[in-house]
Image (cartoon, helix red, strand yellow):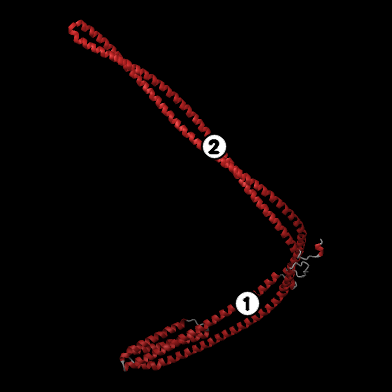
Amino acid sequence: MQLKNLPVRTGFIAVLALFGMLVLVTALLGIYSLTRNNALSEEISTLNTETVDLKDVYINNLKARSALSRAFIALSSNPADKDAAVAAATGYYNLAKKAFTAFEGIPKETSAQQDAAKRVSDTFHAHASAIDQLFAAIASGDVKAYAATNEGPMTQTSAAFGKSADAFFAVAGDESAQLEDQKAHAKSLLSGIAIGMLALSAVLILLVYHALNRAVVLPLKEAMRVLEHVARGDLTVAIHHESTNEIGKLFESMKAMKGSLAGIVHAVSGGTDTIATGVHQMASGNTDLSQRTEEQAAALQETASSMEQLTNTVRQNADNAKQATQLVMSTAQITEQGNRAAKEVVATMQGLSDLSGKIADITNVIEGIAFQTNILSLNAAVEAARAGDEGRGFAVVASEVRSLAQRSASAAKEIKERITDSLGRVEAGAQQVERASQVMAEILTSVNRVSDLMGEIAAASEEQSEGIEQVNRAITQMDQVTQQNAALVEQASAAALALEEQTGALKNAVSVFRVERALAFA
């Protein structure tokens, strides 16, 4: 496969994979070098720690021997200073043993370290035994034992411990130097590899740049040149490319795009004349329609005004009918009250008639009593006449009684006549009131009928008002819709004119494109 036919995606993946491998190798080398250096540094630090601990043992032993020497001198010259010197020697000795314990606690990595550490341990224990003997001699105050131990075992063990410590220092120094050399060698090796990787990366970058320039950059520049011609309206530019990758497909698509654009430009150029003619006719028709719609809107507006006046008139009639209904209802209520009052008068007149009848009965009783009294007085006068002179006084009384009876009968008769006359008049009045009550009832019935009729008239007027108002609203809506239609027609007319102008502008814009003659005359 030629490089120019290599897919761009595959090329980018290969480049990314190559640089990824370089980055991975560099990272692995860096990690390995860092791990190795850390391990070497830890070993060097361990050796330094061991050396420091061992030096602390040696120095503290020397300080303890020096303090014991001061205590030995204080035995003979100043016994009071002995305890202080012994305490100082004990402190130094304990520090030495603590440092030795730390020294022994550190693992020894190499056999040389282990052998040297074993010799140090043996000589330290022997030297510690000699120091213990010096402490015992000081504690007992045995000057001779102290001198013998100090000149004999102490000197020998101290020298042996010093030699073993020096031997360990020598081993630790040699191994530290070797570790430092290894660190330097690893650093040099890593530096060389890094320089090599940088050189390889620079070479790869140059190769990739050259390959991308040939496979991507130059074809894209050619594509930009073609697109610039197309942007200027030149559809006759030639498109040539031999690769079969994505760049080649891009050029094939551009070639197809150029052909499609040429066809579209030809079609648009041929259709603009037809569109212009149709738009002109549409603009003329919209203008006529706009005039007719405005006339219809004016007529609907006049109709809406007339319907509004009619609505106001019917609404006023409905209001008047409601008021008349209310008046009739008020009259019906008043008539009902008059009817009730007439019935009450009839009842009262009936009561008076009954009372007059009772009074007439009482008068009859009085008249009967007067008649009987008159008869009795006649009988009394007869008996008084029979009695002669002895009955004169009784005759006078009988005469007076007779006179009173006659006067009572006359009064009773007159009362009866008056009551009879009143009773006739009461009956006549009762009949007249009864007839008035019947007339009031008929009036109430008529008023109720009139009230019902007025209610029906008011309801019909209200329904008529609502219907006319609905018609008015419908006509108003029709007026609004017609006005909106007129506005839309005007907008459509303006849009048609604007479209006509845009069609001309489109024709001018399409005329910028240059197409091949064969396509132009196809």
Q: Quadrant of the C terminus?
A: bottom right
Residue pictured at 51% horizontal, 37% vertical: 322
Residue under circle 2? 459
Q: Residues within 10 Å of mark 2 (few under 14, many from 20)?
A: some
Q: Position of residue 205 (x, y in %)?
A: 67, 77
Q: Residues within 10 Å of mark 1 (few under 14, many from 20)?
A: few
Q: Are marks 1 and 2 in contact (CB under 8 Å)?
A: no
Residue 365 seen in the current view: no
Q: Position of residue 54 (x, y in %)?
A: 46, 86
Q: Position of residue 4 (x, y in %)?
A: 74, 72
Q: Nearer the viewer, residue 246 or 148?
A: 246
Q: Nearer the viewer, residue 347 or 417?
A: 417
Q: Nearer the viewer, residue 301 or 91?
A: 301
Residue pictured at 72% horizontal, 51% vertical: 285
Residue at disc 2, secondary structure: helix
Residue pictured at 40% horizontal, 93% vertical: 152
Residue type at the position of mark 2: Ala
Residue at disc 1, secondary structure: helix
Name the mark on residue 375: none
Q: Position of residue 460 (x, y in %)?
A: 56, 36
Instruction: Report the Cα–Cα distance between label 1 and label 2.
Output: 103 Å
